Amino acid sequence: MAVRLGEIRLRRYPLGPGMILVWVLAALGMGVAVYRWIYGLGATTNLSDGRPWGLWISFDMMSGIGLAAGAFTVAAVVYIFNLKKFYPIVRATILTGFISYTLAALTLMVDLSQPQRIWHLIIYWNIHSPLFEIGWCVMLYLTVLALEFSPVLFDALNWKVPLKIIRAITIPLIIAGVTLSTMHQSTLGTMLTILPDKIHPLFYSRLFPLYFYLTAIAAGLAMTVFESFHSSRTYGYPFEIKMLSKLVKGIPWVLGIYFVIRLAELFITGKYLYLLQGGAPAVMFIIEMVGGVLVPILYFSDPNTRNDVHGITWGAFFTMGGLILNRVNAALIFMDGSFYLPSWQELAVTVGLTCLGLIMFDAAVRFLPMFPEPTPKAVKRL
Amino acid sequence: MPISRRDFLKVTGAGLGALALPAAPVSASTTEIATDATASMLYDSTICVGCRACQVACKRRAGLPPDVDPSGLYEMPHDLDSKTWTIIKLYKDQNSDSFVKNQCMHCIHPACVSVCPVGALEKLESGPVIYHRERCIGCRYCMAACPFSVPKTEWEKPLPFIQKCDFCADLQANGEQPKCSEACPTGALIYGTRKAMLDIARGRLVGEGNYVQHIYGEKEAGGTSMVYISDLDFTKLGFPEQSDVSLPDITWPYMQGTLGVIGVMVTLSTAIYLRTHRKDKNGNNGNNGSNGNNQPPKGKEA
């Protein structure tokens, strides 16, 4: 039976030191965000005329949205490809996507110079701008994710009519989600293609849209492993290793294609000479391509590591780290500009928003029927 | 063996553009303008004496506050910023020296105009790139995308706007010339159509003087309204080694491809969905282990 709202008792909310820290950091982050809205970016960040984009854009926005790609990938696998064995992770994955996109939107509200005007995206159009497309896609996709997730809520509240309506449009919603994700995940790459002379050639590519799309799919799948790891460790749900290990079988293919194309580009264009020159760009390139691409490929191709809880989790961490490193390298470290290290306020907002995401995920897992079959252990804890 | 980024990108652009992009011929993505007739300025660094009359005239006309020291005395700004739209700098080494003027280059195909998600930057047909602050959301994409790092923002304010040279578009509309070229006492900075400026520049390069045989801005970033000649290497004067690619033309084919992406993804998803769900029509309900709480995909009800 499903766990209904009425059956949930709140008094056993475990206020351990970890959870207290998460709440404190989230509160601190929100506090700093409010301070930043009052006093401005100059007073709170290390951004400057020579460095207009910092941690919030390269990490929170670009990496955050990339890691949230699991929501559309798993939805497509289950509903479009009809592989229903992956159904048990759909809800958690879509929730993670919804939370990640909400956090990205919140980050944007902190980063924009004129956040109160974010709605201008709706009335002022510039179809030449990649950011215009991303803005629209994120707005629409957030709506799609909310609708995709709404059955869980309706289910918990036992609202029959809205549930029926949503179920009737599930497939069009999933297709819309897949299409919108394909658009903006690749367009995040397009955004950086207009900087050919500012991004170091080892990291710049006209193929950014393809690279961003492929790495997002891989890291999105890896993120589902991390979610299951987190849910099993924190809430006592079973770690669905058998199912996950089947899911991550796709990662070596996706990352393999990416790896081959990126290396081919390196040699066709002659950019490999930068590797021979050495220095920080070459070292970072190798770390990114080996640690973030090759290592995950090895982890997930080998059935022994793939079917091992530690192996699959580490593989997921490397994949996610690879995406983050890729985005930060291109949009921050190897983009020409003034010297920049994030201020403590920037770090506090980033950490705080991440903690807010954890609190939201935590709340959903506790109060909503996130996993189709509540495990005996979970029921006992509730 | 230093490798010039510029050379590489020419190769990269040629080789990979073809791989990645739709084959459609690329046309100028921003407003089509008659390049020859567009408003332009020529700065000849060999004539400039560094009096900074242009700098002062600019601040006065744009109403920009002066830079002041702690006691309120006026100071020289030391770079373009939200209070300084144009600036004169000096390059000096043991054998040579030269002044150089910085301001918005007013690109023929401005990256800032193409990247702005709300169209707050506009390329006027007459030449200037102007800013509509009432639209700006402050994403600062223009600052990142500008190959010359010209747009600056008011970091100290809670709600900052972008600040940059507007080429005195309002004065030009009245048939007047920009205040900086009007203020120049030596003729180092002159104003006219782009064709006229380039003709004068070419004439000077083949005439007397020790000019570097290059007109900066003629082709850089697809061409700019501001063009420069000098007897010193342009990199010494702080100009970036800029490829000749018109930057909006890089992103525009991808943006045009968006409709294709929508078409392909919707069609492909629908086709795969129909194919993978064929069996179900024969009553083969393969819904594994779903219960009232397990939302089955559409078509699984019944």
Image (spheres, coloured by chain):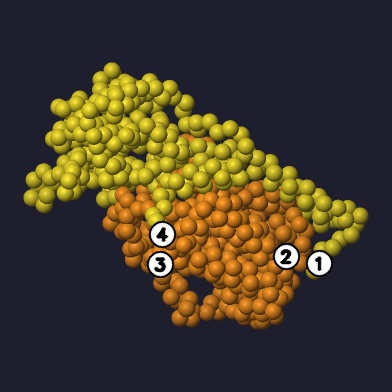
Chain colours: A orange, B yellow
Residue visible at 47% across and 61% down in the picture: A275
Where disc 4 sits, the SS reads: helix
- The label on residue A333 is 4
Mark 4 vs mark 3, CA separation in Å? 29 Å
Answer yes or no: is residue B86 visible: no
Q: Amino acid at mark 2?
A: Tyr
Q: Which residue is mark 1?
A: B288
In-image side of B58 versus B214 (left or right): left
Compare marks 2 and 3 and give the one earlier in the sequence: 3
Q: Are marks 2 and 3 on the same chain?
A: yes
Mark 4 vs mark 2, CA separation in Å? 39 Å
Mark 1 vs mark 3, CA separation in Å? 43 Å
User: The C terminus of chain A appears in which quarter of the rendering?
Assistant: bottom right
Answer yes or no: is residue B279 visible: yes
Count residues near mark 1 (Cα–Cα under 10 Å), then give few for <14, some for 14-19, many for 20+.
few
Provide residue A58's location: percent of width, then percent of height.
Answer: 45, 57
Q: Amino acid at mark 1?
A: Asn
Q: Which tag is nearer the camera, tag 1 or tag 4? A: 4
- The label on residue A27 is 3
Say whether marks 2 and 1 touch (CB < 8 Å).
yes
Residue visible at 32% across and 34% down in the picture: B213
Q: Which residue is mark 2?
A: A87
- Quadrant position of residue B89: top left
